[in-house]
Amino acid sequence: MRLARTEQATPFMALMAAWQVLLCRLSGQDDVVVGFPFSSRMGMHSESLVGLALNMLPLRTSCAGNPTFRALLRQVRKNVIDAYCNADIPSTG
């Protein structure tokens, strides 16, 4: 987790990067997409709602070119932050 702190990443981001490296290696694919749950109770408009409000956010990572773990962690960090920033955009599917 020291590497995560050095790269200003959370433990979740470091574990996600490790998981995606494993998926790339096991599947033989350069691109992997993993969905992760995100609580969609943001803002005052959802305070009166009852029940579970979860969305799945996709996290795509490219292992093309055999990047170092540090480079992959940076990529995952950026992708996680981008996913959280765009979480309020409704899906069309």
Image (cartoon, rainbow, N blue to C red):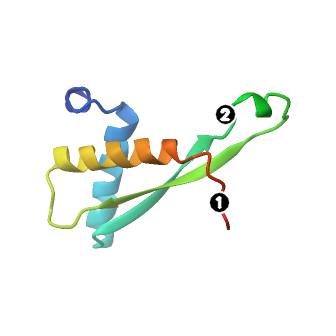
Compared to residue 78, the image places residue 31 above or below, namely below
**Label 1 vs label 2: CA separation?**
16 Å
Name the residue tied to disc 1. 91
Q: Quadrant of the N terminus?
A: top left
Expressed as whole percent of the image width and height from the top left, the position of residue 89 reads 61, 51
Observer-nearest of 9 and 26: 9
Expressed as whole percent of the image width and height from the top left, the position of residue 83 reads 48, 48
Residue at (66% x, 40% y) in the render: 40
What's the mark number on residue 42? 2
Mark 2, secondary structure of its residue: loop
Q: Quadrant of the C terminus?
A: bottom right
Mark 1 and mark 2 lie on one chain; the one further toward the N terminus is 2
Res 61 → quadrant: bottom left
Residue at (67% x, 33% y) in the render: 42
Res 47 → quadrant: top right
Residue at (27% x, 70% y) in the render: 30
